Amino acid sequence: MSNGTFDFNVFIKESKDVLVNPKSYFSTMQTSGGMGEPLIKAVIYGAIAGILRLIWGFLHIGGMGGIFGGTIGVMAFIWSVIAAVIGLFIGAVILLIISSICKGSTDFEANTRVVAATMVIMPISALLGFTDGINLYLGGIIGLAVNVLAIWLLYHGLVEALKSKPKTTRIVMFILIALFVIMMFVGFSASRRASKFMQEFNSSDFTEQLKDIQKD
């Protein structure tokens, strides 16, 4: 994309290239040219992800179900756009630190552009987000797969665009994957405990006691 302009057709092509051939894309990606382009990319990816969550909300699919599904979907859309913008800059800072550790570029704009490109993951995550409501473990595994894909894209962004050392970058990426796996199992454990607590709560005498109080 040229400076000062934003070509949506080029945006679509670049999005495909990031997913299909990230090594080639990041090796030729422009690392300068202003903050407008990465910001627009983040907003578009966030909006697309928000629209998908909005659709799941109105269709009462997955975790967006219930009588408030549509309302939750609208809020998810708004928050998705806001989170994309905030995440762009927070992610750029985190990536800059990782790049510094891996002896890569510490230019903030370059790191921001890499993060913006990898945010193509947001619509994919939102598209598959309904699986959380179908099955806890299915949603967790798919979520982990999406995160691994994001890390794979970041690896190529670090090595090809930010010129970090491949060996050190691989070690850091494997550590991140391990952290995501741990977080997934912790989430499974917390969900099981919450489900067990609710079952015990519903089967206890508390409900009957509450009914007796209301009758009195």
Image (cartoon, rainbow, N blue to C red):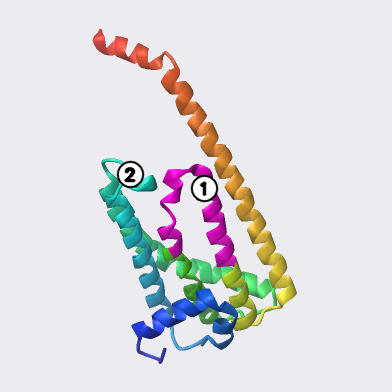
Rendering quarter of residue 46: bottom left
Which residue is disc 2 drawn over? Answer: 65
Q: Residue at x 29, y 50 (%)?
A: 59
Q: What residue is at 42 percent from the left and 45 percent from the top? A: 133
Residue 111 visible, this angle: no
Q: Residue furthest bottom?
A: 2
Indicate whether residue 60 is drawn in magenta: no
The image shows a total of numbered marks equal to 2
Question: Could you classify mark 1 by the number of other residues whose Cα lies within 10 Å: few (under 14), some (14-19), or many (20 or more)?
Answer: few
Whichever of callouts 2 and 1 sits on the residue coming sooner in the sequence is: 2
The range drawn in magenta is 124-151
Is 37 drawn above or below residue 193 in the view shown? Answer: below
Amino acid, disc 2 = Gly
Tag 2 secondary structure: loop
| Residue at x 56%, y 55% (from the top left corner) | 144
* Mark closer to the observer (2, 1): 1
- Across and down, in percent, residue 169 comes to 69, 71
Q: Position of residue 116 (x, y in %)?
A: 47, 74
The residue under label 1 is which amino acid type?
Leu
Calculate the distance from the C-alpha at mark 2 to the C-alpha at mark 1.
Answer: 17 Å
Q: Is 150 one of the magenta-colored residues?
A: yes
Q: Which mark is residue 5?
A: none
| Magenta segment main secondary structure | helix
Please state, as top left, top right, bottom left or bottom right, where the N terminus lies in the image: bottom left
Q: Residue furthest right?
A: 167
Point out residue 117 in the picture as x, y percentages from the top left corner: 48, 75
Return the x and y of residue 99 as percentages of the image width and height. 64, 74
> In the depicted view, which residue is nearer to us: 51 or 186?
51
Is the C terminus in the top left, top right, bottom left or bottom right quadrant? top left
Residue under label 1, please give it: 138
Relative side of 74 to 129, left or right: left
| Numbered disc 1: secondary structure | helix
